[in-house]
Image (tube, grey):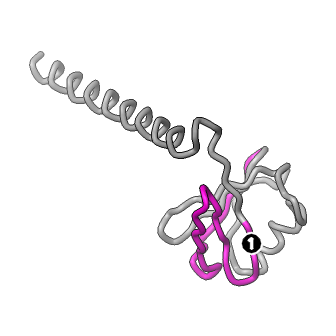
Amino acid sequence: MPIFVMILFCLSFMFISYRSQVKAMIQRDKEVSGGEPLCCKISVTDEEMTLLALENRTPISIGNLKSAFVTKNYIVVVTKARLMFIFKKDSFTLGDVDGFIAFLREKGIKIKGKKK
């Protein structure tokens, strides 16, 4: 019985810790963005993907992309360091989903999931 209580206590502590960290991150984002939703833009060229958020520019070389997977509404590109770039399928301002998937395949990036 004491082992069961200890396991239950540890799991509860982990859950509470996780929730508090998520809440803190949400509060930080709200503070930095002035209470507005945090908006990020990602641009892709032949050489790099660039994340633009809150006046910060973070470039990632195309050579550092490892894989991608496609869901019903999103394309998620994963780097070698497990950083994820998430593209909403209906948010492309230049080009389209099919062209982007073809571009990724052309660059040798493995694509998992269904296209549509």
Residue farthest to the top? 1
Residue farthest to the left? 2
- Count of all numbered marks drawn on residues in the image: 1
Residue farthest to the front? 34
Locate residue 19, reporting x and y percent: 39, 30
Above or below, 6 relative to 26: above
Q: Disc 1 marks which amino acid?
A: Val
Within the magenta stretch, is there residue 61?
yes
Q: Residue tagged by mark 1?
A: 44
Q: Main secondary structure of the magenta part?
A: strand
Above or below, 48 relative to 93: below
Mark 1: few/some/many CA within 10 Å (<14, 14-19, 20+): some
Q: What element carries label 1?
A: strand
Locate residue 48, reporting x and y percent: 67, 78
Locate residue 86, reporting x and y percent: 67, 54
Residue at screen point 49% across, 37% down: 26
Residue at screen point 12% across, 16% down: 1
Locate residue 2, reporting x and y percent: 9, 19
Please state the extent of the stretch shown in magenta in the rendering: 43-72
Residue at screen point 74% across, 68% down: 43
